[in-house]
Image: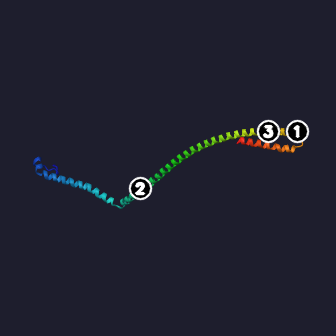
């Protein structure tokens, strides 16, 4: 049996293409163009329908809301970071101030210790001078007592006058020693 779908051309193929070549080419291009339009148009129509659906619109609104919230959070984060940087700068400044104050305090302490040592040395010197002066006063008091006893022996009758006379030299001696200490 002969195939039904095949139709044998009685003309040579070159002649067929020459006669109907332009028509067939235009027809093929038209069919291919229509096929491309249909193949691309149908999914595009489905996409447009889906994009305009209520669920898609809700999703777009949610995305926009998320973007707005994200933007606000980014602004708050940037502000918090600026605050943190400012706080760090203040902490650095405070630390530098503390270091400077500690150095100043150490210098003041050293100067105070030096002054205390100088004053202790002066006090020690003055204590030695006071001890020397006290010893001198005691020695002079003993000499004065001895002199008073000799005067009392020579003149028994005028013992009150001699004791009054002995007080001014002692007073003059004490005033002289106090002037030496100053």
Percent of width and height locating residue 152: 87, 40
Q: CA distance from mark 1 to mark 2?
A: 120 Å
Quadrant of the rendering where the C terminus is positioned: top right
The residue located at (17%, 54%) in the rendering is 27
The residue located at (82%, 39%) in the rendering is 144
Compared with 112, 80 (above or below) is below
Instruction: Give the mark toward the camera: 2 or 3.
Output: 3
Q: Residue furthest right?
A: 157
Q: State yes or no: discs 3 and 1 in contact (Cβ < 8 Å).
A: no
Residue in front for this viewpoint, 130 or 103: 130
Q: Identify residue for label 1.
A: 154
Q: State yes or no: discs 1 and 2 in contact (Cβ < 8 Å).
A: no
Q: Secondary structure at mark 2?
A: helix
Asked whether residue 60 appears in the rendered view, the answer is yes
Q: Quadrant of residue 178?
A: top right
- What label sits on residue 71 in the rendered view? 2
Q: CA distance from mark 2 to mark 3?
A: 100 Å
The earlier-in-sequence mark between 2 and 3 is 2
Q: Identify residue for label 3.
A: 140
Q: Residues within 10 Å of mark 2 (few under 14, many from 20)?
A: few
Is residue 86 rendered to the left or right of residue 25? Answer: right
Is residue 143 rendered to the left or right of residue 23? Answer: right
């Amino acid at each position: 049996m002969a195939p039904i779908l095949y139709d044998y051309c009685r003309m040579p193929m070159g002649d067929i293409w020459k006669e109907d070549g332009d028509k067939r080419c235009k027809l093929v291009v038209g069919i291919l163009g229509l096929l491309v339009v249909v193949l691309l148009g149908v999914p595009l129509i489905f996409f447009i329908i889906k994009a305009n659906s209520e669920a898609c619109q809700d999703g777009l609104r949610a995305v926009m809301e998320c973007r707005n919230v994200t933007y606000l959070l980014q602004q708050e984060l940037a502000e918090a970071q600026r605050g943190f940087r400012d706080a760090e700068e203040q902490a650095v400044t405070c630390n530098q101030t503390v270091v400077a104050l500690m150095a100043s305090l150490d210098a003041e302490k050293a100067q105070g210790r030096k002054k205390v040592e100088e004053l202790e040395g002066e006090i020690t010197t003055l204590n030695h001078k006071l001890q020397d002066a006290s010893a001198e006063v005691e020695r002079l008091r003993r000499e004065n007592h001895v002199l008073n006893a000799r005067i009392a022996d020579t003149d028994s009758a005028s013992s009150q006058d001699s004791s009054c006379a002995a007080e001014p030299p002692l007073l003059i001696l004490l005033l002289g020693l106090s002037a030496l200490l100053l």
